């Protein structure tokens, strides 16, 4: 029974090695992952551009003073809260773009031909060592091989997991497209602000204009917060969590006796 068990173990190791080689060389998971990262990067750039455009629109009207005789209202002061939030959001988006750029670089490293060749050679050597029952070398090869396999598929797996979590648990409540449209519409409304047609003796006009801006601030601010949550989760928190898992995996692996 012991001989049969060892034989099945060897067959299983060989099968898994062939599967890893197939996924590394012949599957299209790398292309799909690369495409996901590119789409995420373009989306982040688009959202970042929308936020900066809103910031620029607010800056243009920031010094505008309106109001009936005897009353001065500075539009920029009304828009200050949303302007501050947009500036903070810009820092979040800059960090998100940096994170996506790093993921792109790591993806290029682990999917290059050189990395695949090293992985295939290590897999071949690990199988040879395992078949010849050299336990000490077997442990070292297997631990090193597991780390290489984890690195090889970490970015693709993180990309798939990230997309799955977003589509199934996040998108229903926090949608990037919806929030980005709200930010873009807010920018257009501010661009269209024109006080030249108002009666300088009509206080109701200014009350309505202030009320419109307050509603704009409330709606846009909520969606900017939504975008902050989405990009912090997808591009910062999720990768950090994955790095923590990698760290724990490596520590556990090298403290575990195979």
Image: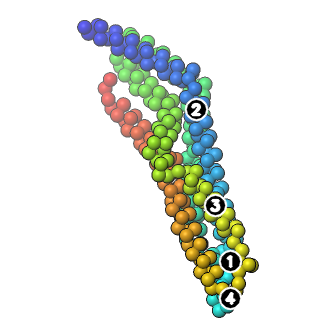
Residue 26 quadrant: top right
Q: Earlier in the sequence, mark 2 or mark 3?
A: 2
**Is label 2 in a helix, a strand or a loop?**
helix
Kindly tell me whether residue 64 is visible in this rendering. Answer: yes
Residue 256 vs 240, above or below: the answer is above
Q: Disc number at residue 32?
A: 2
Left/right of residue 238 with respect to residue 251 in the rendered view: right
Q: Earlier in the sequence, mark 4 or mark 2?
A: 2
For discs 3 and 1, the disc positioned in front in the rendered view:
3
Mark 2–mark 3 Cα distance, whole angstroms, equals 32 Å
- In depth, the one of 98 and 32 nearer the eye is 32
Residue 232 vs 134, above or below: the answer is below
Q: Disc number at residue 215?
A: none
Q: Disc number at residue 201?
A: 4
Residue 253 lies, in percent from the top left, at 36, 31
Residue 193 quadrant: bottom right
**Is label 1 in a helix, a strand or a loop?**
loop
Left/right of residue 198 with respect to residue 232 in the rendered view: right
Residue 43 lies, in percent from the top left, at 61, 47
Mark 1–mark 4 Cα distance, whole angstroms, equals 21 Å
Dot 1 corresponds to which residue? 63
Q: Disc number at residue 185?
A: 3
Q: Earlier in the sequence, mark 3 or mark 4?
A: 3
Q: Do the residues bearing badges 2 and 1 touch, measured as CB atoms within 8 Å?
A: no
**Is label 3 in a helix, a strand or a loop?**
helix
- In depth, the one of 143 and 45 nearer the eye is 45
């Amino acid at each position: 029974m012991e001989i049969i068990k060892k034989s099945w173990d060897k067959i299983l190791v060989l099968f898994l090695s062939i599967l890893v080689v197939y996924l590394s060389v012949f599957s299209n998971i790398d292309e799909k992952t690369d495409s996901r990262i590119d789409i995420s990067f373009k989306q982040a750039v688009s959202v970042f551009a929308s936020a900066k455009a809103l910031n620029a629109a607010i800056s243009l009207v920031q010094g505008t003073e309106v109001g009936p005789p005897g009353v001065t209202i500075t539009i920029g002061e009304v828009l200050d809260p949303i302007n501050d939030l947009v500036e903070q959001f810009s820092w979040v988006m800059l960090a998100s773009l940096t994170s996506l750029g790093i993921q792109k670089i790591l993806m290029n490293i682990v999917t290059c031909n050189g990395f695949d060749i090293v992985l295939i050679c290590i897999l071949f050597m690990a199988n040879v060592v395992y078949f010849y029952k050299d336990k000490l070398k077997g442990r070292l090869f297997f631990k090193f091989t597991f780390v290489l396999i984890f690195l090889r598929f970490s970015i693709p797996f993180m990309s798939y997991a990230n997309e799955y979590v977003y589509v199934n648990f996040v998108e229903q409540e926090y949608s990037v497209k919806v929030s980005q449209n709200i930010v873009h519409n807010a920018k257009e409304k501010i661009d269209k602000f024109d006080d030249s047609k108002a009666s300088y003796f009509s206080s109701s006009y200014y009350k309505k204009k202030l009320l419109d801006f307050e509603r704009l601030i409330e709606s846009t601010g909520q969606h900017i917060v939504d975008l902050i949550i989405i990009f912090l989760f997808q591009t910062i928190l999720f990768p950090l969590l994955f790095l923590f898992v990698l760290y724990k995996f490596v520590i556990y692996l090298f403290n575990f006796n195979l």
